[in-house]
Image (cartoon, helix red, strand yellow):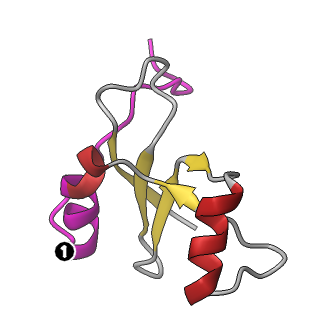
Amino acid sequence: MRLSFVGIDPRSPDNGCPAVFVDEDTGDLWFQGETVTDREALAEVTRHSPLGPAEAVVRVPAVMKAFIVEAANGTYEQGRRGPGPHPGRG
């Protein structure tokens, strides 16, 4: 599997998430974000789509829309790297 980094929330205090990735082998989009645990929010989601045992709802803030569009359209910069850490980086 080859994941390409597309973007991270520039407001993230620890450069950890949310982030968007593309699986280069399948074209699937991968989202890193805050797992939703609020019962009311989960109830609203499951009214439309039940959650399987291995599934989670992940919140991705609106500021990430541009990265999601880049990922979906394939217009993201190849080789873009997140803030790290990166093995082999000086």
Which of the two residues, 35 or 70, is positioned nearer the viewer here?
A: 35
Answer with left or right where residue 7 lies relative to residue 14: left
Answer with left or right where residue 11 lies relative to residue 75: right
Magenta highlight range:
66-90
Residue 22, by quadrant, is bottom left
Which residue of the protein is positioned furthest toward the front in this rendering?
40
Residue 83, by quadrant, is top left
Q: Residue 51's spot in the image, x, y percent?
A: 72, 79
State which quarter of the image contains the C terminus.
top left
Which of the two residues, 52 or 68, is positioned nearer the viewer here?
A: 52
Q: Is 84 inside the magenta-drawn segment?
A: yes
Tell me the crowding category of disc 1: few under 14, some 14 to 19, or many 20 or more residues within 10 angstroms, Cα based. Answer: few
- SS for callout 1: helix
* Tag 1 residue: 73
Residue 17 can be seen in this image = yes
State which quarter of the image contains the N terminus.
bottom right
Q: Main secondary structure of the magenta part?
A: loop
- Residue under the point 21% across and 71% down: 74
- Residue under the point 49% across and 63% down: 30
- Residue under the point 72% across and 72% down: 55
Q: Residue 35's spot in the image, x, y percent?
A: 64, 50
Q: Is 4 inside the magenta-drawn segment?
A: no
Dot 1 amino acid type: Asn
